[in-house]
């Protein structure tokens, strides 16, 4: 990890030090993704079979996994594995169910009533990464709130393993969470299928889920098209920032950094340490723990994008956080709660030594589908609201139109829109 002393950097150097890996914005990658999107749009399922063989090295016989296979996978799980899935599902459901919004009704003035009511989107496409790490947790994080929100069609896409199958734990969790349909396809081609629809895969109103740079680019591109689907947020390779001082356990800090580094070679981890002694202890622990990781090669390459900042005062620490806008922020400082109010930009915050980032990834109840690449400056992670839209409703009485009508007439005159004014005037005349 490259080391920087924050107070010694000028503005330009600070921006450079906080820069993300460039893989997600690579021009050649964007061009390739556009080609994949157009191929699927034009050729449907045939393109999906061909692209899956090209990119995943798998020749599929069918895109859809029947519900009977999902049920068989659930039945084949051990009782203990069923219990941990059910426990995580219960906590995620409990936290998201608490987010169900109440209808709003306001009489803005006598005789003028305005309401707002929530409606679930009809068809949600749920992307579950499954390449080097089959993310059963993402299946839970997306399908549980979608069902709580009342989404009618919950369509899962996930890449095949080298044997052409979906990891049985993903299938089992999909059955437990009552997904509507599940398809074996990943990468940019899966996003294209959800965006445009194919013979097998239904077109979706909104696409959810994290992924690699190809998936992130595909989501961004389809969302820009006229009539294209909405997306949950801009999201690319995972990232984490850990704050550490002399009260921190270096082993805990290192484990949180490595838990993100093992995701992807272009994941980014940042540590903000109180002093060089803390930084040295953390880096020593990283090297020790790295040796025992099954994905140590991925983690080590990711650490090449890592950063270690030395910052010894609260103002600088807050400045680093809000400039970077981390996906995950782990606060292992004395009195961590004292920092929360000043943090404007973060996807999810983990407070204190006993709150590893992993609990949010799996089972605390908060959602782990979070904005990356600085998008936390403007976007939230997935919430129940992500699966809802709001309809405004208004109704005026005769008295209400008499009171408000002249205001609307004059505003329409200001804009030169005669028909708008007439729609009010005709009614006012009818009330005479």
Image: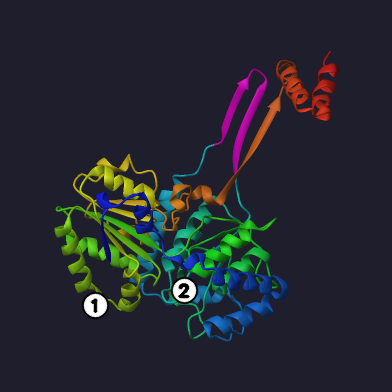
Q: Position of residue 335 (x, y in %)?
A: 20, 44
What colour scheme does the image use? rainbow
Q: Name the residue under label 1.
A: 292
Q: Would residue 108 be counted in the magenta stretch? A: yes
Relative height, residue 107 to residue 222 (above, below): above
Frontmost of labels 1 and 2 is: 1
Task: Bin the neighbour count of mark 1 within 10 Å (Cα to Cα): few under 14, some 14-19, many 20 and up.
Answer: few
Q: In which quarter of the image is residue 279?
A: bottom left
Task: Bin the neighbour count of mark 2 within 10 Å (Cα to Cα): few under 14, some 14-19, many 20 and up.
Answer: many
Secondary element at tag 1:
loop
Relative height, residue 45 to residue 239 (above, below): below
Relative height, residue 7 to residue 426 (above, below): below
Q: In which quarter of the image is residue 3?
A: bottom left
Q: Mark 2 points at which residue?
A: 130
Give the distance between the C-alpha atoms of the residues marked 1 and 2, in whole angstroms. 23 Å
**Magenta-colored segment: predominant secondary structure:** strand
Q: Where is residue 31 in the image (x, y as percent from the top left)?
A: 60, 71
Whether residue 78 is visible? yes
């Amino acid at each position: 990890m490259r080391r920087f002393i924050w107070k010694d950097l000028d503005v330009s150097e600070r921006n450079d030090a906080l820069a993300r890996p460039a893989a997600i914005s690579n021009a050649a990658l964007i061009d390739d993704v556009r080609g994949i999107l157009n191929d699927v749009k034009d050729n449907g399922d045939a393109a999906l079979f061909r692209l899956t063989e090209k990119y995943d090295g798998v020749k599929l016989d069918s895109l859809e996994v029947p519900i009977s296979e999902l049920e068989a996978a659930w039945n084949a799980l051990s009782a203990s594995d069923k219990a941990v899935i059910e426990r995580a599902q219960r906590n995620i459901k409990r936290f998201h169910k608490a987010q169900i919004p109440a209808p709003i009704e306001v009489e803005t003035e006598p005789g003028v009533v305005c309401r707002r009511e929530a409606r679930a989107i009809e068809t949600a496409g749920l992307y579950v990464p499954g390449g080097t790490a089959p993310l059963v947790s993402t299946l839970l994080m997306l399908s549980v709130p979608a069902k709580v929100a009342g989404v009618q069609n919950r369509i899962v896409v996930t890449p095949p393993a080298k044997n052409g199958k979906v990891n049985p734990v993903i299938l089992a969790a999909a059955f437990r969470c009552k997904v509507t349909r599940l398809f074996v396809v990943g990468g940019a081609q899966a996003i294209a299928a959800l965006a445009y629809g194919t013979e097998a895969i239904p077109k979706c109103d909104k696409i959810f889920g994290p992924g690699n740079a190809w998936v992130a680019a595909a989501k961004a591109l389809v969302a820009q098209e006229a009539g294209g689907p909405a997306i949950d947020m801009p999201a690319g390779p995972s990232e984490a920032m850990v704050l550490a001082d002399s009260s921190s356990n270096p082993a805990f800090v290192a484990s949180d950094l490595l838990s993100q580094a093992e995701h992807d070679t272009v994941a980014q981890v940042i540590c903000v340490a109180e002093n060089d002694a803390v930084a040295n202890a953390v880096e020593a622990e990283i090297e020790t723990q790295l040796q025992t990781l099954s994905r140590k090669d991925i983690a080590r390459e990711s650490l090449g994008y890592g950063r270690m900042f030395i910052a010894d005062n609260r103002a600088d620490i807050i400045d680093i956080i809000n400039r970077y806008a981390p996906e995950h922020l782990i606060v292992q400082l004395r009195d961590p709660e004292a920092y929360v109010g000043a943090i404007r930009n973060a996807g999810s915050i983990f407070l204190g030594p006993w709150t590893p980032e992993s609990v949010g990834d799996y089972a605390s109840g908060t959602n782990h589908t979070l904005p990356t690449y600085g998008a936390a400056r403007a976007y939230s992670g997935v919430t129940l609201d992500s699966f809802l839209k709001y309809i405004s409703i208004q109704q005026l009485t005769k008295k209400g139109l008499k009171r408000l009508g002249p205001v609307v007439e004059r505003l329409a005159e200001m804009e030169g829109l005669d028909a708008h004014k007439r729609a009010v005037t005709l009614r006012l005349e009818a009330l005479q």
